Image: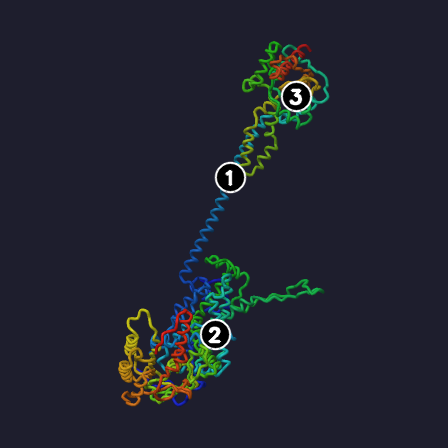
Amino acid sequence: MAMRQEPFGAPGEIGRVRPVTSEPPAASEGPISIPDLLHPEPMTRIDFENTKLAIGFAFASGVSGGLFSDALDRARFAPSTWEPSAFVNDLFLTSLVAQSFQVRIGGEEAAISTKHLGRLLAHPPSDPAVAHHRRGVLAELAGSPPLRRELERLFVLLGQLRNLLEGALGGGRWDANRRQLDILHVVKRIIDCLAEGFSAARSGLSRLAAFGMRVRGGEPYASLADLLRYDENLATVNLRVGIGADGRIRGFEVLSIAENTKNPFVASPLRRFLGKLELFVRGYSFGSREVMARLIDAVFSALTDEIVRFVQLLGDVEFYLGALGFRDKARAAGLEVCLPTFVSAEEPRELLGLFNPLLLSVGPKVVPCDLRLDRHDTTTLVTGPNSGGKTRLLQSIALCQLLAQAGLFVPARAGRIAPATGLVVSLIQETKADQAEGRLGMELIRIRALFEKLPPGAMVILDELCSGTNPSEGEDIFELVVGMLTRLQPQAFITTHFLAFAERLEKEHKIRDLRFLQVELGPDHEPTYQFVPGVAHTSLAGHAAARLGVTGEQLLSLIERNVAEAGGGRPRSGT
Amino acid sequence: MPTLLTTSRMSPALAARVEASVRGGSRGGGEGRLLRQAVLGMRILLLLAIVAGIVALVRMRQRESDEVQRSREGLLAKVRAHATALAPEDRRAVARIEPWLVRGSGQYEGDVIAEELKGPGALASFLSRPLVYVHGPTAEFDGPSGIAAAAATSQKDAFLLCLLEPPATRTENALLSRVHGAYAGGPRLEARTSQARRLHETEAGLRFLQPSFEAALRAAKDTQELGRLERSLKQAPIDAALAAARARLLLFVMDEPGDGKGLTELDGERAHEVRVGLVDLSAGRVLLRLRKHVDPSWISLPRRAQYAAGLDQCALAMDVHAHVAGG
């Protein structure tokens, strides 16, 4: 498999949020037909024709059955070498999106398409320019509250359009014209918001302004505006109202009636009547409503292609507002996020203030840590006591890699990350009723599957490798796997409790590019949730047992209590 | 094809889309156009059906009107044919008769026997001419409505039969023979008294020859109303009325109330005074006016209960003949 070797970003600067000007200004971008916020080369990712049909049907009938969700859930993404099935479940990606990538407007949480967002995160683009593009948009949004407010306003308008089209409000059943005019009102406001709200943007957001300006300059938009004015102002009647001494209206006089004759939709009363008659002869209903329906249809038909773009745009907006929501949530917990600096694999890995985003919604105080390694393409063995944070560290590293390559904020104050060609995570070792093998067998099956689909330069995350058998035999397999992994130059992180074995590997240097991290212990031998170089000397299983109530004294007291409750005699003595 | 929904101020692109929308070419595509064509076809069919229904209704109404008119004309012709058979004065026969009856029911003016009745067989000769007969209580002949009521219940009876065919003797059995004939009624009685017409027949028949009936025929709006009038005309005794209208004699019998002291027989007969009149309508002269007392006490008991009235009437007729002959 061919690999792109160039780094995602210029090395040397630890990524703080800063304006990124990778996109040229709107003026030089030319006509924009697709308001794609996710890719430097605009692309249509939803099924355009089917979505167009669905929108036409929804506009006509007011019933769509979730056309936005359907279109977004089936959307394509930029090419990615990552295989979502290799990490989505182990990283609880769906939970992360649902709990941390929330969009809050005016203090209220807004509904977003979490499935689309989850799929988008699970497909980090292979082309570094895409991530660059997204980082530019995100950096500008993070640095410009007015632009963020405009994006939120756009999100609200797109939500209104979605509700009206999908009939979620249920108000259009009685008057189809009114519902359709309401939809056209929202469409106009969206176009106006795009054209006016993002004119100052310098990043990929400027594409919204270019798109909005292009649509506003076209005849369909002018007709849309004329139709809405026609709906609101067919004529002006000047009245003189007489008020009596008691304050009540005693009479009125029509001073003048002026039709809005400049509006192209305004016709003479005779022509309006003949128009109704014509429609009746053509098989339509006879009435003003049918005339308006034909005019609405004529205006809407020219805007359908643009409205289809709004469906995709909603998914893009959710992507960025979700990322900003993640940043807000981290800040609320006293944590910082950043857009990391992309470096090459030979350069040091630095993740400062790294935290596990899955813990943001769990409740306990999240303790960030600093992670430093001299290069990326190494295999790192992580040792330390139970409940010392090893598994959480692995999750954090993997999520950092995933979010960074998706072009989003990573859960770290600052970072330097080398892109990986893929991600394989094996953290969960749950037992299934129908599994064909025992624990070791299942683990070996996973190792086999890992090697079957692992590309060179990928990130590998393994928790407690070969812990399902006796240590002496498990160590042999462990050494074999680690030795083979190095041939693929992975960014590997593996936890183990084979402490003596790890110590031996550290001393022997038999396997090249092997690094060792251990959980730092405090003065009282409690884990500090920080990681330092080296191999741990103890897993402190006794501490964990004591913390969880599994000492000899604690178990004996439980036994005596149970015997007493059962009315029995003394428990048998034993060692 | 241009549409009236476009205006000159619309841009060409918008106008084209409006036309496409009206044609059904923008959304819905061919299916929408087909649907509207189907609707248009249905509307045309519905319109044609309505027009055809209206035409059929008009033609049906026209046929009905023609039929009514034909029926009306037929009935009018029939009525006019009957009417032309009558002299103008005969059409007023009832009006000509009523004053005589009112007068006859008033203060009794005394017996009268015209000279031309006094000769042998003179009365019988007069009575062989067409005459109008009515018999009823004196009190009912006080006006047109009372007369009509009395005429409606007045039938050809024993007095009429015995007057036209006097029995050979005045014995109870001889009289009873005539009474049986009168009570039997039917064609035989009709044949024996064919020259006499009931006043009711005159009234009932002549009503259909009056201008008011022609007006009703003309005013009839439909076949139902016209049919009802036609059925009435068919049931009307026109021929009898014509005969009655041409009659020049009026024969009436008026029963006075009586003193109420005597017995009343089971058939209602009791002792009372009876007025008998014969009027020459063309001359406007009373030929005969008599007041006779009838009393069923002379009748044998076995027959009195059932035939008292008939026997008294027949005896009265015999008395009239006897009085005229003795006059």
Q: What is the x, y in percent for residue B148?
A: 64, 27
Crowdedness near tag 2: few (<14), some (14–19) or many (≥20) residues, C-alpha within 10 Å: many
Q: Secondary structure at mark 3?
A: loop
Task: Reply above or below: B135 against A356.
Answer: above
Q: Amino acid at mark 2?
A: Phe
**Cα–Cα gap, marks 1 and 3:** 46 Å
User: Which picture quadrant has residue A346?
Assistant: bottom left
Disc 3 vs disc 2: which is toward the camera? Answer: 2
Q: Nearer the viewer, residue A350 or A178?
A: A350
Q: Are marks 1 and 2 in contact (CB under 8 Å)?
A: no
Q: Which residue is mark 2?
A: A155
Q: Which residue is mark 3?
A: B281
Q: Chain of mark 2?
A: A
**A217 sits left or right of A43 in the view:** right
Q: Secondary structure at mark 1?
A: helix
Q: Nearer the viewer, residue A316 or B118?
A: A316
Query: Does residue A259 appear in the picture of this structure?
Result: yes
**Cα–Cα gap, marks 1 and 2:** 75 Å
Task: Reply above or below: A9 against B200.
Answer: below
Q: Amino acid at mark 1?
A: Glu
Instruction: Work out whether disc 1 and disc 2 sit on a shared chain.
Output: no
Crowdedness near tag 1: few (<14), some (14–19) or many (≥20) residues, C-alpha within 10 Å: some
**A443 sits left or right of A14 in the view:** left
**B134 sits left or right of A499 in the view:** right
Q: What is the x, y in percent for residue B216?
A: 59, 35
Q: Residue furthest front?
A: A569
Q: Which residue is mark 1?
A: B64
Q: Chain of mark 3?
A: B
Q: Nearer the viewer, residue A575 or A396?
A: A575
